[in-house]
Image (cartoon, helix red, strand yellow):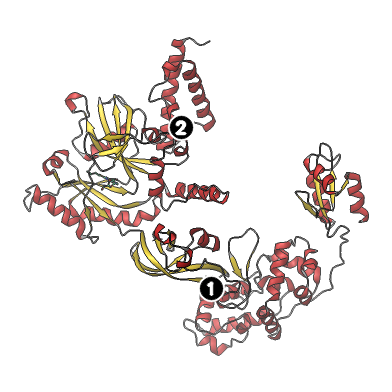
Amino acid sequence: MTSFVDAAREALALGKKLRHHAHLYYVLDAPEMPDAEYDRMFQRLQALETEFPELETPDSPTRRVGGKALEGFTKVRHKVPMLSIRTETDITAGGASAFDARVRRELGLAEDAPPVGYVCELKFDGLAINLRYEQGVLVQAATRGDGEVGEDVTHNIRMLRQIPLRLHGDAVPPVVEVRGEVYMRRDQFEALNERQREKIAAGQKNEKVFVNPRNAAAGAVRQLDPAVAAHRPLSFFAYGLGEVSAPEDGGPDCPTQFDWLQQFLAWGFPVATQTRRASGAEELVAFHEAMGQQRDTLPYDIDGVVYKVDSVALQRQLGFISREPRWAVAHKYPAQEQLTEVLAIEVQVGRTGKLTPVAKLAPVFVGGVTVTNATLHNEDEARRKDVRVGDTVIVRRAGDVIPEVVGVVPDSLAKPDDQRGPVFTMPRKCPVCGSDALREEGEVDYRCTGGLFCGAQRKEAILHFAARRAVDVDGLGDKLVEQLVDANLIRTLPDLYKLGFTTLVGLERMADKSAANLVEALEKSKKTTLPRFLFGLGIRHIGESTAKDLAKHFGKLDAIMDATEEQLLEVNDVGPVVATSLRTFFDQPHNREVVEQLRACGLTWEEGEPAARAPKPLAGKTFVITGTLPALSRDDAKDMLEAAGAKVAGSVSKKTDYVVAGAEAGSKLEKAITLGVTVIDEAAMLALIENGV
Ligand code: IVH
């Protein structure tokens, strides 16, 4: 049994170490200790606190783990109101100058007085929180609420690793309230939504997908169950102050906002590294521009920048008008999300044949440009979001990213079904060329199978065909293909071989020599090999090695084009996905026409005889292996069965032909017996492989 004194000493030391390493890990992103070691210390501290409950302090790292769910939130009256900040709506450079001019006027500065010193900060898009520390210990966290009265969310805020439960360092005032923004990083937001989607897919009705990081962060902070909140990853930046002890009462003496930010850092809070001192309007404008450039590369959302008069004395002098300080202003960026109406849903075909549903929108200014199209990604997404024609939707455009429909507003979703447009379904024919559109198992995208003919895939098809590893047309690169297709000189592959010297020379930036070289390269490419030709057709899933296997197995192109899926499956490494892909490709009349035309253009290769068939004694039979076999590993047994043409499945069903059972076979064996499936041992399996059924 540990003595209380020893336990207290150990708990103190552990608490200190854990706090230090948590800060390194969560705030500085520079861990110095493996997670397992951290966990070990953490558990030891928990054990000590269980044995001696007196040791459990409010700032103990163990308090970060979720407690009981709360009934509701307690109201908190802020000691110092949480004000809002004036927004400069003039988004041109004039915004910063107008602010600077106003500050100078209100301070009564002469024209030739030196520039005013400012601090430039990011305007984080999360929610403001007030953190109250007494004697350095976090005693309360409250939301902004209406600025006067907020909600007590201490239980959830304790879960945030980036918020110290005890202020670091020795300069700890009797009272201080640190204010800042709780936010969610974009990657963590995406990951959270991914988990939410999985939950919804698994039938959990109460779960929802969050529209943006701010919304997710706000939801997490106001979550009544701390255990749930603990799984919503949140971050924090400090930027302001509430009540604080005066310097004569032991409070820090910080004459500027910049000094305060340094103090926050020293206490263990994250402060954005982008924060800068600036003097005069021009430097403010420069900051606004620089951050505007960086905006999309930051790991979190910002909706603008904030300028603050640096000197605390000048801040006091400037004071407040209504509920806004005169010493600070927010200079916003164009909003990245807006509402608009869906006019139509169209399907676009990409260069590689991917079909993407696109919402046609009533024009809306978002993220700095007018948007009329937004991607719905794929059929599943379009249905999950339940976007229909006539709906009002939230459109998001961040940086160079393609605008997307985030979701439908509740008002539209709430309309009766017959007052909304039809549920979106993906067309089964390519809207560009009319070929079959196919969605492979396990894939989210539909693809056009008319690769050789489809207008959308033209450039890609030509480039692929001409590639070095395909028929190898030397000198036919993407720029030239672009030029030829855009000039309508090539529509499908055979057009390539109709290009003459005169046509080529007529092209912009095309010298005589290059044109002659290309004509020669085209001529040369006509004599090729079957694998190169086959690979060059750009059939989905047919890489170089599969093309070689196919050529070897069938010998002739016609044999490949006419092979059934079953026959294709006999080829080495050809599985159902590849077989279906080949079959569908050659089922498209347009693709066949292109192949014929290419042959007519003089493309030739040597054809061979089909390879002698390796005997496949177990073709068409399905096996399940269960238990431990005496000699073979399960993987080896599986390989041998598959080499003999059998399919090896993971579970027993009526379609199973044989169950191979070894020692300690369990439920699969029982199921086989129930279903009356033949059960054999390893020796019998080897005999079947040897002699067939
Ligand atoms: S200072 C008295 N600084 O913007 C000034 N606010 O309308 C108080 N915000 O509710 C705010 N980043 O949620 C300040 N660097 C920053 C900020 C910031 C984001 C938010 C905050 C506040 C709102 C102001």
User: Number of numbered discs present?
Assistant: 2
Q: Badge 1, how many Cα within 10 Å: few under 14, some, many 20+?
A: some
Horizontal arrangement in the rendering, residue 627 relative to residue 22 (left or right): right
CA separation in Å, label 2 and label 1:
57 Å
| Residue 478, label in figure | 1
**Residue labelled with disc 2:** 66
Ligand 1 occupies quarter = top left
User: Is 686 located above or below residue 550 in the figure?
Assistant: above
> Mark 1: which secondary structure?
helix
Horizontal arrangement in the rendering, residue 654 relative to residue 2 (left or right): right
User: Is 140 located above or below residue 111 in the figure?
Assistant: above
Quarter residue 632 falls in: top right
165 or 597, nearer to the observer: 165
User: Is 253 located above or below residue 317 in the figure?
Assistant: above
Quarter residue 442 falls in: bottom right
- The mark nearer the N terminus, 2 or 1, is 2
Of the residues shown, which amino acid type is indicated by label 2? Gly
> Mark 2: which secondary structure?
loop
- Is the residue indicated by label 1 positioned so its CB lies within 8 Å of ligand 1? no
Quarter residue 583 falls in: bottom right
Residue 494 in the image: x percent, y percent?
Answer: 63, 83
Residue 398 in the image: x percent, y percent?
Answer: 39, 59
Residue 362 in the image: x percent, y percent?
Answer: 37, 70
Of the residues shown, which amino acid type is indicated by label 1? Asp
Residue at image point 45% right, 27% down: 62
Residue at image point 22% right, 29% down: 252
| Residue 600, label in figure | none
380 or 600, nearer to the observer: 380
* Camera sees residue 259: yes
